[in-house]
Image (cartoon, rainbow, N blue to C red):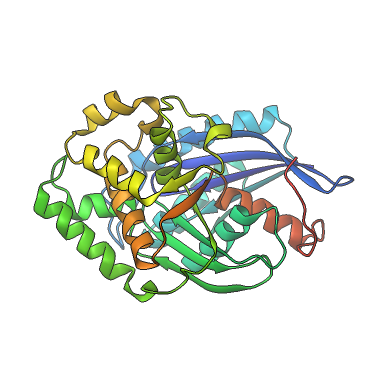
């Protein structure tokens, strides 16, 4: 069985094509595709998604449809997150897309996004092992604590790389007082986590901010998933990168770090500030970077719900 999983985020739209072997009971990622249409740009709660952004999203989905056909996918799973949660015309946009592509789109709540991201990030399951998962998106940030069978805490926080940038930064690099205000806001947002979930837990960070930081730390200018996956990113590494970013405009960021930052060169600083704030609130010094997350969790969840995967067994990616 070949499954396509599309994650429509606020900054990126991601496609995973994975093969599930019903005999061997394993999941094999066949391809990953990344586009950054930033459909949430300038959006506030209750706004309508503009025609230009809808057209941009349709263009990306058209490119993805070509790959879905090429891989002869048996199932297409599409998940929409924060942008579709806040816009007032989500029903109309979904109707237009579903009519064009004959696909079903599911808008997930913040809590459900957190659960699915957790599921995708910790698979293959280590039975009874407790984990933290951090997912920094364009419009929201999810934090989850638990294991394969029981999520003990999950929350979607109303802060993301695009929304924080637009809220506080009038220029790039931002003024010092803007950066300070963004940090204080981030600390306030995550204040309920203070002193919690900082035990001997594996903390996994997913999405574009940590994967990009992993590349920067390793001096990788062109994305290499095999080198990014499971890379240990230290708090001191992120703070050092912040000290560089605060001196550069977005063009200099792209020149300095290469293709790995394209599409997020103007929001990477905000992502760093969010990640540092969250790490300090839960008092951890490192995170393990994962290239997986929501789109993988959607596949795992689909297989479990259709009795094709048993979450009590420690499966592996092939």
Q: Is residue 47 visible?
A: yes
At 19% from the left and 41% from the top, the residue drawn is: 246
Q: Is residue 267 visible?
A: no
At 41% from the left and 38% from the top, the residue drawn is: 212
Seen in the picture, residue 185 relative to 43 is either above or below; the reply is below
Q: Decide which of 29, 195 is in the foreground and name it.
A: 195
Seen in the picture, residue 43 relative to 45 is either above or below; the reply is above
Across and down, in percent, residue 221 comes to 41, 25
At 23% from the left and 39% from the top, the residue drawn is: 245
Q: Decide which of 61, 162 is in the foreground and name it.
A: 162
Tell me if 182 is positioned left or right of 213 in this view: left
Across and down, in percent, residue 51 comes to 35, 42
Quadrant for the N terminus, please: top right
Quadrant for the C terminus, please: top right
Across and down, in percent, residue 202 comes to 55, 59
Q: Quadrant of residue 116?
A: bottom right
Across and down, in percent, residue 94 comes to 50, 52
Tell me if 108 is positioned left or right of 233 in this view: right
């Amino acid at each position: 069985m070949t499954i396509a999983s599309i994650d429509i985020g606020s900054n990126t739209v991601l496609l995973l094509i994975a093969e599930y072997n019903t005999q061997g009971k394993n999941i094999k990622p066949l391809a990953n595709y990344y586009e950054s249409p930033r459909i949430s740009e300038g959006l506030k709660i209750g706004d309508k998604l503009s025609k230009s952004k809808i057209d941009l999203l349709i263009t990306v989905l058209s490119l993805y449809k070509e790959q879905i056909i090429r891989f002869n996918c048996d199932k297409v799973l599409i998940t929409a997150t924060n942008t579709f949660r806040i816009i007032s015309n989500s029903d109309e946009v979904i109707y237009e897309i579903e009519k064009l592509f004959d696909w079903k789109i599911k808008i997930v709540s913040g809590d459900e996004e957190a659960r699915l991201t957790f599921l995708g990030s910790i698979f293959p399951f280590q039975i009874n092992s407790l984990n933290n998962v951090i997912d920094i998106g364009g419009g929201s940030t999810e934090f989850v604590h638990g294991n394969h069978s029981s999520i003990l805490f999950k929350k979607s926080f109303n802060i993301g790389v695009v929304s924080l940038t637009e809220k506080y930064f009038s220029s790039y690099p931002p003024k010092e007082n803007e950066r300070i205000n963004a940090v204080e806001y981030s600390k306030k947002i995550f204040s309920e986590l203070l002193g919690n979930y900082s035990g001997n837990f594996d903390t996994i960070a997913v999405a574009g901010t940590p994967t990009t930081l992993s590349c920067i730390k390793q001096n990788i200018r062109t994305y290499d998933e095999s080198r990014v996956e499971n890379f240990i990113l230290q708090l001191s590494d992120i703070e050092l990168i912040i000290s560089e970013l605060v001196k550069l405009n977005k063009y200099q960021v792209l020149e300095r770090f290469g293709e790995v930052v394209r599409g997020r060169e103007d929001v990477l600083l905000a992502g760093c500030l969010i990640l540092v704030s969250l790490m300090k609130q839960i008092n951890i010094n490192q995170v393990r970077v994962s290239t997986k997350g929501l789109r993988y969790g959607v596949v795992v969840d689909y297989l479990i719900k259709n009795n094709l995967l048993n979450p009590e067994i420690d499966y592996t990616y092939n």
